[in-house]
Image (spheres, grey):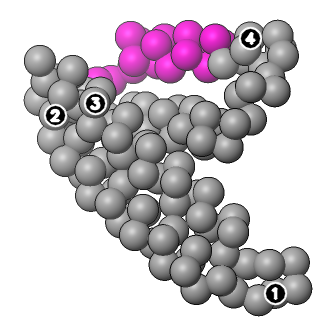
Protein backbone atom coordinates (compact mmCIF):
# COMPACT_ATOMS: atom_id res chain seq x y z
CA UNK A 1 0.00 0.00 0.00
CA UNK A 2 2.85 2.40 0.86
CA UNK A 3 4.41 1.82 -2.57
CA UNK A 4 1.10 2.59 -4.28
CA UNK A 5 0.66 5.82 -2.33
CA UNK A 6 4.27 6.84 -2.97
CA UNK A 7 3.87 6.09 -6.70
CA UNK A 8 0.74 8.25 -6.93
CA UNK A 9 2.42 11.07 -5.01
CA UNK A 10 5.58 10.81 -7.14
CA UNK A 11 3.52 11.03 -10.33
CA UNK A 12 1.67 14.05 -8.96
CA UNK A 13 4.92 15.69 -7.86
CA UNK A 14 6.48 15.00 -11.25
CA UNK A 15 3.50 16.53 -13.05
CA UNK A 16 3.77 19.75 -11.02
CA UNK A 17 7.55 19.87 -11.54
CA UNK A 18 7.13 19.24 -15.28
CA UNK A 19 4.69 22.17 -15.44
CA UNK A 20 7.25 24.23 -13.52
CA UNK A 21 9.89 23.39 -16.13
CA UNK A 22 7.45 24.25 -18.92
CA UNK A 23 6.72 27.68 -17.44
CA UNK A 24 10.41 28.25 -16.67
CA UNK A 25 11.23 28.00 -20.38
CA UNK A 26 8.61 30.68 -21.06
CA UNK A 27 9.96 33.04 -18.39
CA UNK A 28 12.76 34.54 -20.47
CA UNK A 29 12.45 35.80 -24.03
CA UNK A 30 15.25 35.68 -26.58
CA UNK A 31 15.76 39.40 -25.97
CA UNK A 32 16.35 38.81 -22.26
CA UNK A 33 13.01 40.19 -21.08
CA UNK A 34 11.32 38.47 -18.19
CA UNK A 35 7.69 37.34 -18.25
CA UNK A 36 6.71 37.73 -14.60
CA UNK A 37 3.49 35.72 -14.87
CA UNK A 38 5.29 32.67 -16.30
CA UNK A 39 8.08 33.04 -13.73
CA UNK A 40 5.58 33.17 -10.89
CA UNK A 41 3.68 30.17 -12.28
CA UNK A 42 6.94 28.25 -12.56
CA UNK A 43 7.74 28.94 -8.90
CA UNK A 44 4.24 27.97 -7.76
CA UNK A 45 4.38 24.67 -9.67
CA UNK A 46 7.90 23.89 -8.39
CA UNK A 47 6.94 24.67 -4.78
CA UNK A 48 3.86 22.47 -5.07
CA UNK A 49 5.86 19.69 -6.71
CA UNK A 50 8.62 19.66 -4.10
CA UNK A 51 6.05 19.77 -1.29
CA UNK A 52 4.33 16.69 -2.69
CA UNK A 53 7.72 15.03 -3.26
CA UNK A 54 8.68 15.52 0.38
CA UNK A 55 5.46 13.79 1.40
CA UNK A 56 6.04 10.97 -1.11
CA UNK A 57 9.44 10.28 0.47
CA UNK A 58 7.63 9.34 3.67
CA UNK A 59 5.77 6.56 1.88
CA UNK A 60 8.84 5.49 -0.12
CA UNK A 61 10.72 5.10 3.16
CA UNK A 62 7.83 3.15 4.69
CA UNK A 63 7.88 0.91 1.59
CA UNK A 64 11.58 0.21 2.17
CA UNK A 65 13.06 2.60 -0.40
CA UNK A 66 15.27 4.65 1.91
CA UNK A 67 18.14 5.40 -0.49
CA UNK A 68 18.08 9.04 -1.53
CA UNK A 69 19.67 8.00 -4.83
CA UNK A 70 16.81 5.66 -5.69
CA UNK A 71 14.19 8.13 -4.50
CA UNK A 72 15.72 10.80 -6.72
CA UNK A 73 16.00 8.45 -9.71
CA UNK A 74 12.31 7.60 -9.46
CA UNK A 75 11.36 11.29 -9.26
CA UNK A 76 13.72 12.21 -12.12
CA UNK A 77 12.36 9.53 -14.44
CA UNK A 78 8.78 10.54 -13.67
CA UNK A 79 9.56 14.23 -14.20
CA UNK A 80 11.30 13.64 -17.54
CA UNK A 81 8.30 11.58 -18.68
CA UNK A 82 6.00 14.38 -17.50
CA UNK A 83 7.93 17.00 -19.46
CA UNK A 84 7.77 14.81 -22.59
CA UNK A 85 4.01 14.29 -22.20
CA UNK A 86 3.12 17.90 -21.34
CA UNK A 87 5.24 19.31 -24.18
CA UNK A 88 3.88 16.75 -26.62
CA UNK A 89 7.41 15.71 -27.60
CA UNK A 90 6.68 12.03 -26.90
CA UNK A 91 4.34 12.02 -29.91
CA UNK A 92 7.34 12.76 -32.13
CA UNK A 93 9.43 9.89 -30.74
CA UNK A 94 10.56 7.05 -32.97
CA UNK A 95 11.78 3.53 -32.18
CA UNK A 96 15.21 4.55 -30.76
CA UNK A 97 13.51 6.99 -28.36
CA UNK A 98 11.16 4.31 -27.05
CA UNK A 99 14.04 1.82 -26.86
CA UNK A 100 15.96 4.31 -24.72
CA UNK A 101 12.91 4.70 -22.49
CA UNK A 102 12.68 0.94 -22.01
CA UNK A 103 16.43 0.81 -21.24
CA UNK A 104 16.03 3.52 -18.60
CA UNK A 105 13.11 1.71 -16.97
CA UNK A 106 15.08 -1.56 -16.94
CA UNK A 107 18.10 0.29 -15.55
CA UNK A 108 16.05 1.84 -12.75
CA UNK A 109 14.52 -1.52 -11.91
CA UNK A 110 17.99 -3.07 -11.81
CA UNK A 111 19.31 -0.34 -9.53
CA UNK A 112 16.35 -0.83 -7.22
CA UNK A 113 16.81 -4.61 -7.18
CA UNK A 114 20.57 -4.58 -6.65
CA UNK A 115 21.11 -1.39 -4.71
CA UNK A 116 20.62 -0.40 -1.14
CA UNK A 117 16.98 0.33 -0.61
- Please tell me whether mark 1 or mark 2 is closer to you in this view: 1
N-term mark: 1 or 4:
1
Mark 1 or mark 2: whose residue is earlier in sequence: 1
User: Which residue lies under the disc numbered 2?
Assistant: 59
Q: Tell me which label, 4 or 3, sits earlier in the chain.
A: 3
Quadrant location, the C terminus: top left
Name, please, the residue furthest toward the bottom: 33
Give the side of residue 19 with respect to residue 95, left or right. left
In the image, 107: left or right of 31? left
Q: Position of residue 17 (x, y in %)?
A: 47, 53
Identify which residue is drawn at 41% across, 12% down: 114
Separation of disc 3 and disc 2 at Cα?
A: 10 Å
Q: Give the extent of the magenta segment.
A: 102-117
Q: Position of 96 compared to 12: left or right?
A: right
State which tag comes first along the sequence, 3 or 1: 3
Looking at the image, tell me whether mark 3 or mark 2 is earlier in sequence order. 3
Write the residue at 27% across / 58% down: 51
Q: Quadrant of residue 10?
A: top left
- Is residue 114 found left or right of 59 in the rendered image? right
Q: Secondary structure at mark 4?
A: helix
Q: In the drawing, what numbered circle is on residue 32?
A: 1
* Mark pair 1, 2: CA separation: 42 Å
The image quadrant of residue 93 is: top right
Q: Is residue 72 visible?
A: no
Secondary element under disc 3, as helix, strand or loop, is helix
Q: Along the polypeptide, which appears first: circle 4 or circle 2? A: 2
Query: Which residue position holds label 3?
Result: 8
Amino acid sequence: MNMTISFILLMLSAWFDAKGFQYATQTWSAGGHVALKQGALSLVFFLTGVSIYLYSVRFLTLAGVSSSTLQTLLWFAATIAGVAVISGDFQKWNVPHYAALVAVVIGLATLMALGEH
